[in-house]
Every structure is written in structure tokens, then in C-alpha cells.
Amino acid sequence: MPLHKHVVTQVEQGTRLDVLLSGLEGVASRSAAVKLIEQGDVTLNEQTVTKKHIVVAGDRITYRLEPPQPLGLIAEQIPLDIRYEDADLIVLSKQAGLVCHPAHGHESGTLVNALIAHCGYGNLAQLQGDDRPGIVHRLDKDTSGLMLVAKTDEAGLLLQDGIRSKAIDRRYLALVHGPIASDTGLIDAPLARGTTDRQRMVVSDAPTSKPSVTTFSVLERFEAGRFDDGFTLIECKLFTGRTHQIRVHLDYINHPCVGDPLYGSSNRPKAQLGLDRQFLHSYKLEFTHPLTGEELLFTDPLPADLQAALAQIESKSLARGKQQ
């Protein structure tokens, strides 16, 4: 929650704390001031005191205010699969079909709405804007798996720094069309929003494009069948976090994700293994807790629909690749 500070002046000396606080920025009334004091959101010279405390000139008042919640951003009881939670952050597994934050066409029913119901709007970091509380990074609507959520601005800033510096290791499992010959690869291709279809991202050298780097290692290959060209199961690692990055990069090297409705080919439906969403899952997250220093590692098994797709081609498995 936003932190406010005030130094008591000579004119204000001799006033009760709750009376003085009620006249400070963001405090709507004396009852609101009393509530802040009683719930421990006010300190005087870094100490908690009662509402009746008489202030003197030079006293340092620090108080926290819950940020105003944007109109229309409501709490919704949407199930959350939380794997870890403390006072600073949450690690959760996002289900496929859940949009991360409200946007045009998805004004409600998002992860943000669920987080507000779970934590309260004021107990989530506000770094990404007041309509995206808690958001540190995003997963596409139909990409499942592990995500970080920040409960405080301090944790959010440090987590964002960790993502930028590559200190937070994020790994994904993807099943792609066709055989990938090399065991490892690096895709370094800048991305920009498409000019004809604004929903699509494209590899581009336009001035608006942003550097984008993905590496991958082959975990398993599957031989071709009657309705497909074979498949490759890979582990992807993000070095940048652009919209649709893995999906666009894999399509760029002619190995789109199985089931991808936006970047994959849909003219051979049986090759999609019954999927109507991309086979892409954030399965591993490893990082140092930014405030406690604890080393944290989380893994998340494939959800049922992706397991079922993989089971269909299990008998076609070839020699396994080398996991990095």
C-alpha cells in the first residue's frame, strides 16, 4: 500500500494524533484516521501509538493508505491453485482459459479479479497500473502453469529486476509439429505487433520491434504418422518476456506449438491431437526470494488435456534428447 509521510509543524503541535491525521492527504475523516491507527498502519517516529497521543513539532508521522480501487474492478471467487504464499509474493499455477488481467473483451473473470478476492486490492503490488494489481509477468490466456504474483511494491520491483537480469529461471514445456534435428537451439528474433492483424505478434526489424530471445532443448521426439509430420517435445527458456514470445518464435522456425489456434496450422485437425489450445505449459520456476534470500524451486506437472495429447503419441516415441 502507498506510504505517506508528514512532519509535525509548530502550528500542529499539541494536537491529538487522530485529529491531525484526519486532515492529512488521503485520509477522508477522523473515523478513517482512527481505523488506520488501530489497524497498525500509522507510526509516530517509527513507533505505534494510540489515537489520543499528543504530537509535538518535529514528530515524523508515517501512514499507509489502501489505493483507490478502479471502478468496475471487482473481487470474484475464481479458484486459485496456490503453490506458495507469504507476506510478499504468491506462486500459483494458472489454469488454461484464464486471462491475467482485465482488457477489452475480458472486463471480468480474470486472474486479477480472483487475486482481489483472495488478498484484497490494497494487499497487491500496484507496479503495473491500478487495473493490474499483483501482476509481475503474464501468461497467455490458454497457456497454463506457474506464475509469480507480488503482494507488495517492494517485492514486485525486485521480482521484475530478477526477470530482467535472468536471475529468475522460467522454463516451459512445448509440444511442436515436426522433428527438430538439433538437441538444443537459440532463437534470437525481435518481435513487434502485426500491422494487419493486431492480435498477432510477428518477427520484425521494424523500429517498434523489441529484442526477444528464447532457447530450447529437445526432450523427446516422436515419429511421423498418417496425419502428421511427427512431433518434438521441448523445454523452452525465456531470456525476454514478450507477448506470445515462445509461440511466435517456434512458428518462426517452422515448428509451431500443437493446438495453437493463432500461430499453428489448422488445415490438418487430426495433427492437433484433440487440442484447441497451444501445448505450452510453464512447468518450472526457480528463484531466490527477493526479501528472505530463500532458494525456491517449483515444478508443475502437465494438466490433463496436455497429458492426454502426449499419451496419444507415446507409442511413437524415438530416442530421447538431452535435457539441459
Image (cartoon, helix red, strand yellow):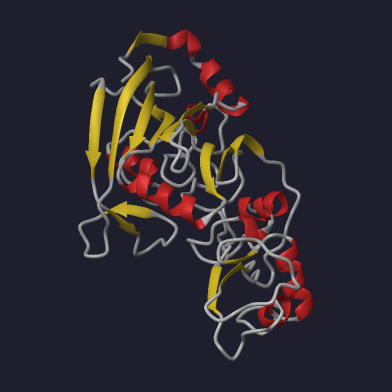
Q: Position of residue 29 (x, y in %)?
A: 75, 81
89 left or right of 324 in image:
right
Q: Position of residue 153 (x, y in %)?
A: 50, 57
Please name the residue shown 46% across and 32% down the image: 294
- Compared to residue 284, the image places residue 181 above or below, namely above
Q: Is residue 143 visible?
A: no
- Compared to residue 304, the image places residue 135 above or below, namely below
Q: Position of residue 192 (x, y in %)?
A: 31, 58
* Relative depth, front residue between 66 and 201: 66
Please name the residue shown 42% across and 35% down the image: 288
Residue 267 figure quarter: top left
Q: Quadrant of the N terminus?
A: bottom right
* Relative depth, front residue between 3 and 302: 3
Q: Of all residues shown, which one is farthest toward the right?
A: 31
Please name the residue shown 71% across and 66% down the image: 37
Q: Position of residue 276 (x, y in %)?
A: 56, 38
Please name the residue shown 55% across and 16% down the image: 311
Q: Quadrant of the C terminus?
A: top left
* Relative depth, front residue between 225 and 55: 55
Residue 173 figure quarter: top left
105 left or right of 220 in image:
right
- Compared to residue 230, the image places residue 1 above or below, namely below
Q: Of all residues shown, which one is farthest toward the bottom?
A: 11
Q: Is residue 170 visible?
A: yes
* Relative depth, front residue between 8 and 134: 8
Count of labels shown? 0
